[in-house]
Amino acid sequence: MNGQLINITGVWTIYRSEIARMKRTVWQSVATPVITTMLYFVVFGGAIGSRIQNVGGVGYGAFIVPGLVMLSLLTQSVSNASIGIYFPKFTKTISEILSAPLSFGEVTFAYVSAAATKSLFLASIIMGTAAIFIPVHILHPGWMIAFMLLTSIAFSLFGFILGIWAENFEQLAIVPTLVVTPLTFLGGAFYAVDMLPQPWRTINMVNPVVYLVSGFRWSFYGTGDVGVGASLAFTALFMALCLGVLWWMFRTGYRLKP
């Protein structure tokens, strides 16, 4: 490592390899989620939004923009990170990564950074696409960028855990299908959480997506389902929990070593 505090060459090699994989699958990685989100704008923002006056003082079409961007950002972060670490397990090349002069933190940083980069790139395209359909007003652009970074990193860490845990493609798909997608749809992407009936409103307050969507929407319009301080605190707690689980996985070799 030539006395370096971080193995820059090793981290950059993994990062560049993961970014190159997105270029090879551009239709699946970029075109498909962008087209899907455009359809959400047409159906919810156009067809349904024309029948709803406003939500929380914001026109419905504009109200769902932060939710749809966040929906794409977190699902893509989970998908990119989980596939990134699962693929070397599937091809039996994970031992080469584990035996390389890279620490647990460097391996995690490389994969999570690549997954976050890809999801942020995609979210930027979707936000630009939204501006074509609906005038987008951003009250706090600095906080908007901060919440995008926090979300991409937090859910890339979660996806990285999922990729290590999964032993086959079915397990790799079952958590996003049965956990991430329901949490996303209950997290206020398409409505304000206080519109939910009890007890779902109370139960939903342990859903981390609520805090991410609320904080992100606050950066656009200055209003959200919970306070921005609570959004930041809950997001930091979620990230700390993911880092703790990853540290334990690498320390014990859980589903990494035979």
Image (cartoon, rainbow, N blue to C red):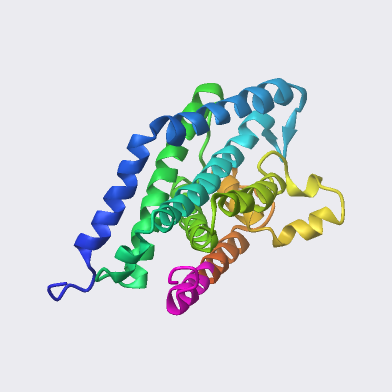
**Residue at image location 50% in from the left, 22% down from the top:** 132
Residue 62 is covered by the magenta coloring: no
Foreground residue among 220 and 146: 146
Quadrant of the frame with the C terminus: bottom left
- Spot occupied by residue 168 in the image (x, y as percentages of width and height): 54, 54
Drawn side of residue 193 relative to residue 93, left or right:
right
Asked if residue 52 lies left or right of residue 43, the reply is right
x and y percentages locating residue 54 in the rendered image = 73, 32
Q: Look at the image and tell me in which quarter the N terminus lies.
A: bottom left
Q: Is residue 142 among what the camera can see? A: yes
* The furthest residue to the left: 2
| Span highlighted in magenta in the image | 242-258
**Badge count:** 0
Query: For this rendering, which residue is in front, 139 or 159?
Result: 159
Position above or below: 1 against 13: below
Q: Residue furthest bottom?
A: 252
Furthest-right residue in this view = 198
